[in-house]
Amino acid sequence: MKITSLDHLVLTVKSIEGSVEFYQTASGMARKDFGTGRVALHFGSQKLNLHPLNAIPDDNVRHPLPGSADLCF
């Protein structure tokens, strides 16, 4: 299998709004809300999904820490 692109990167963050502000200011990424209360930052065809530390939407995350990441191809 040849990897051709990054599908998304998931970041666990203390503050969704603070993270959105930082990444939009630092890099011009565009915020997109999706699903039920989920937030992603898009740049080109790539995206960063933001998961709040206090409400991880994925059952396979057992011990989230701010700054932890999940890389998905």
Image (spheres, grey):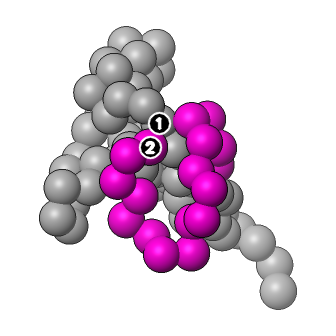
Indicate whether residue 58 is drawn in magenta. Answer: yes
Residue sitting farthest toward the right? 1
> Which amino acid, mark 1?
Val
Pick the residue in front: 48 or 53. Answer: 53
Find the magenta span and give its range.
Answer: 53-69
Please identify the quadrant where the C terminus is shown.
bottom right
Residue at the spot x=61%, y=35% of the render? 67
> Which amino acid, mark 2?
Leu
Residue 56 point in image, percent of width and height? 41, 58
Dot 1 crowding, Cα within 10 Å, few <14, some 14–19, many 20+: many
For residue 48, side relative to residue 57 (left or right)? right
Indicate whether residue 61 is drawn in magenta. Answer: yes
Against 3, residue 70 (above or below) is: above
Dot 2 crowding, Cα within 10 Å, few <14, some 14–19, many 20+: some
Residue 47 point in image, percent of width and height? 46, 50
Please identify the quadrant where the N terminus is shown.
bottom right
Residue sitting farthest toward the top? 25
Mark 1 vs 2, N-terminal side = 1
One can see residue 63 in this view: yes
SS for dot 2: loop
One can see residue 50 in this view: no
Dot label at residue 13: 1
Residue 55 point in image, percent of width and height? 35, 53
Residue 44 lies in what quarter of the image?
top left
Against 57, residue 12 (above or below) is: above
Residue at the spot x=34%, y=21% of the render? 18
Spatial CA span between label 1 and label 2: 6 Å
* Residue at numbered disc 2: 53
Residue 19 point in image, percent of width and height? 39, 26
Give the prevailing secondary structure in the magenta stretch: loop
| Residues at circles 1 and 2 in contact by the CB criterion of under 8 Å | yes
